[in-house]
Image: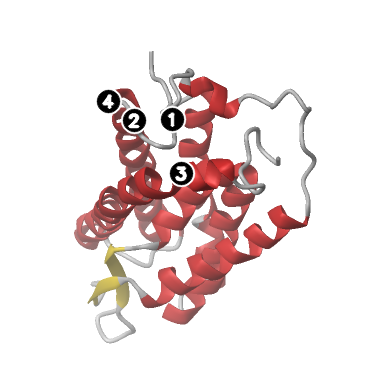
Amino acid sequence: MNKSETGSPAGEIWEVPPSGAKNPGWIHLLIFFVLIFLGTLLGSLSSLSFRITTAINPNGPAYGVNYFWLGIVVQQVGSIWYGAWGVLAGVIFPFISNSATQASLLITAAYLPANFVQSFLPAFIFRRLKLNPKLEGGRDFLYLFLTMLVSSLFGALWSVFILVVVFSRLEWSDALLNFFGWFGGNLVAGIIFNYFLLKALSQRVIDSKGFVRRWWA
């Protein structure tokens, strides 16, 4: 059984304390805005990208493809620690960060399912399976990796669908580059930073007033 440092089952981390369930408070609203700020900052300034000129319009603007997107860290670590507040922030901040890359608002809106899955899946799996955010067992590490893998895979496939099929912004010849840019950029950043942040800081977050055991408090 996966246990915390005190020897109690890791599932107890997600249990409501004997004093009763908390209600969302100002601290959660503050966390929500901080996550949006961090996501916007990392999503727009800390990304490494290459640009491709589409075959559809070779003389038109090139499109950026991220291959190291730190916004995924805010989406996934934020949602594990802060539940629905992290998920909501993970869906909202791409609208702001993508504007810095001159992305169409309509296309960013079409990316919403991908950003939702990338934010929601880790939060859901950790709560559903009662995994330990402190990553103290192999099961915690495995499922974190699987959630990053599956959510990034969905996001990459969705982005190709949106750009090629829905908006005709890319041809199929450009699709593979776009796919691996999204998939690899999210997965590599997540592997490097998600594990480190959860392992190093989860105990402090769990002990704080802002930690969300259910979805809102």
| Residue 165 in which image quadrant | bottom left
Sequence-earlier tag: 2 or 3: 2
Q: How many marks?
A: 4
Q: CA distance from mark 2 to mark 3?
A: 11 Å
Q: Quick one: label 4, few (<14), some, or many (20+) residues within 10 Å? A: few
Q: CA distance from mark 4 to mark 2?
A: 7 Å
Q: In what element is the residue under mark 2?
A: loop
Task: Kindly tell me whether residue 104 is visible in this rendering.
Answer: no
Residue 136 tag number: 2
Task: Kindly tell me whether residue 130 is visible in this rendering.
Answer: yes
The residue positioned 68% from the left and 26% from the top of the image is 16
Look at mark 1 in the image and give the residue it sits on: 132
Sequence-earlier tag: 4 or 1: 1
Q: Quick one: label 1, few (<14), some, or many (20+) residues within 10 Å? A: many
Is the residue under label 2 in contact with that under label 1 (CB below 8 Å)? yes
Sequence-earlier tag: 1 or 3: 1
Look at mark 3 in the image and give the residue it sits on: 202
Q: In what element is the residue under mark 3?
A: helix
Indicate left or right for 42 with 16 as reference: left
Is the residue under label 3 in contact with that under label 1 (CB below 8 Å)? yes
Q: CA distance from mark 4 to mark 3?
A: 16 Å
- What residue type is disc 1 on? Asn
Is the residue under label 1 in contact with that under label 4 (CB below 8 Å)? no
- What residue type is disc 4 on? Gly
Residue 113 tag number: none
Q: In what element is the residue under mark 4?
A: helix
The residue positioned 41% from the left and 28% from the top of the image is 5
Q: CA distance from mark 4 to mark 1?
A: 10 Å
| Residue 57 in which image quadrant | bottom left
Q: CA distance from mark 1 to mark 3?
A: 9 Å
Q: Could you say where residue 27 lies in the image, as x and y percent from the top left? A: 71, 56
